Amino acid sequence: MTSCLKNDEVIKVTARNRFRLQLLLIAVFAFIATFIVVPVNAQSPNTASMIVVVVDQNGAVVPGARVSVVNTATGAGREAISGTDGRSTFSALSLTGTYTVGVSRQGFGNEELKDITLRSGETATLKVKLVVGSEKAEVTVYGTAEGVRSDPQIGRRLDNPQIDETPILGRKASAVPLLNSAFRQGKGTGDLFVNQTYFITGAGSRRTTTTTLDGANNDEGWGRQTMIATLPLGAIQEMTVLSNAFSSEFGWTSGPALNIVTKSGTNGFHGEGLFMGRPGGMQAKTFSTKNFCPPSVASCTTPTTLVAINPVDIPDALSQVSGSFGGPIVKDKTFFFATADYTRQNRTTFLSSALPAFVLPADGNLAYTGHYRQFLFDGRMDHKLTPNQTLMVRFNVDRFDDDNPQDAVGGTNAPSVARRYARRSWTAQVNHTTVISPSLLNEARFAYLNGDPVTLWEAQTLSTTYTRAGTVPFTIGQSRASDLWGHQFQFSDTLSWSRGKHYLRFGGSLVHHTSGGTGSEPGTAILGTFTFKNTTTAPFGSLTLADVQNYTQPINFGISSYELPQCLNAGFVQDSIHVSRNLTVDLGLSYDRQT
């Protein structure tokens, strides 16, 4: 790995001292917060926590009660004894499956609460009122999946059942944020360059969104657009769409944040299969002239010569196959879950009959078909090392190509304009979670993001471009090309500590990102472009240099490729103070540094 400090000689002493001072402030803040707190619960963005408060029928706390929490899907279980404040805390609980909570105490009846569903990054509180004898206890639940958010983030949580039951355009994970009314689709070339939906919220830009995947950063650092590798929709357990990033943990963005948690296996084998088909030749070829004139326009009449309306038939055939399967490798200990998705689309466009005859097919067929293909895969394995330590390993692949992106061929753009766009990206991630104590949790994460290429443009037939506007327009030839890549290593660690009404989180990340390649994002016209005067109407073969309006060709000044290494380091501390059930105060401090 290239060192991020090889150019330290250009960093001023004052800047270095300022950096040390800011780190010192963070340390002081964490130190003070540690001693002013006298513990909510510890969790990370991809897990949840639970507090069980045991009281008697008079509302007095009950110490010494035995509390058990069991995951019905994986068999994972924890036990604790309520403290002097009647509390028992359980950290780093998986979002997979539901939980059964049991409470017992000598002299009281036993109580069991089933089907508790948790959500990422939050703490559920269960208040259990035990009564003497066999009388039914009273249980009050706060902050589970059915409750309101207990932090200042403004957003919407979407779990797997909601995502499955909602028609999502193209089954693209990046289209899910549009289900939040605060988001709207961003204007841009998302489907062209990364095959993902761009979105924005408020006055932000599509480049200010940050994505967290299973607790680790998953931003595409080269163009800072969206996820570097698209996830199959069937791999998502939960997606929280935040229209702001108030938490100091999301320090790299001024815009929205997406927190995605993937599915894991359970003790039972389970899976799903899906096929979606849209035949390309089933569109109606003709329509009745009924309602040709709107009733509100009395002067409108349907032409007597108009027998039927015959629109241009533009077939767009699409088929998509998705499948998921998961289960145990070793019961109650090791689990796997895998999801794959394949999309096949043939889009037909039509050429203008005004094109020069020599560029048109000999049979006179003006249809041109573009082919789009994409394969997605996400595999995950979870292993319980000890009762308090778990290991998660995840691998994600995104491969697609398109030989007519954004229907570039069509109209007055001849087939020789065609170029192929491809993207090859994959990511790997390892999470190690340690429950040090019921109120102290540490999660270390290592991730590698590889986009190689992030953007690959290839002309189908390399040629100088010739173009003309006017009454006889045409564009032929293609020489735009690029081959761009991005690699990113990331290590992050978060320590969460809860005491009384305080929930303290502090941690940081070290990211080394390298991007490079040849060309530019839309590609560079290597062989240049001739633009003819739009007043000319002569066939292409009859045009001369006298008919040329201008000629352009990029100059690289001897630099045809580049490589840009950078480091993005961050530290943060966050304290959520639950003043009361209806009031939470959040204090945070973050420091981000980019070299």
Image: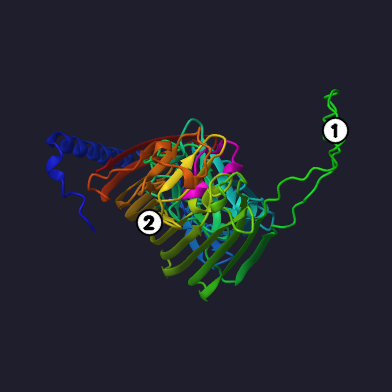
Is label 2 in a helix, a strand or a loop? strand
The answer to which quarter of the image holds residue 549 is top left
* Residue extending farthest top: 299
What colour scheme does the image use?
rainbow
Q: Which residue is mark 1?
A: 302
Badge 2 vs badge 1, beta-carbon distance below 8 Å:
no
Tell which circle, 2 or 1, labels the residue nearer the N-terminal end.
Answer: 1
Image quadrant holding the C terminus, namely: top left
Q: Nearer the viewer, residue 178 or 523?
A: 523
Where residue 468 appears, x then y in whole percent? 49, 39
Say the numbered circle drawn on residue 523: none
The residue range painted magenta reads 178-193
**What type is the residue that disc 2 sits on?**
Glu
Q: Is residue 268 visible?
A: yes
Q: CA distance from mark 2 to mark 1?
A: 71 Å
Q: Residue at x 57, y 46 (%)?
A: 355
**What type is the residue that disc 1 sits on?**
Thr
Q: Residue at x 28, y 46 (%)?
A: 569
Q: Which residue is mark 2?
A: 443
Q: Residues within 10 Å of mark 1 (few under 14, many from 20)?
A: few
Q: Nearer the viewer, residue 194 or 483?
A: 483
Give the side of residue 594 with respect to residue 580, left or right.
left
Where residue 381 appears, x then y in whole percent? 46, 68
Residue 69, placed above or below residue 167? below
Q: Is residue 41 visible?
A: no
Is label 1 in a helix, a strand or a loop? loop
Q: Nearer the viewer, residue 189 or 571?
A: 189
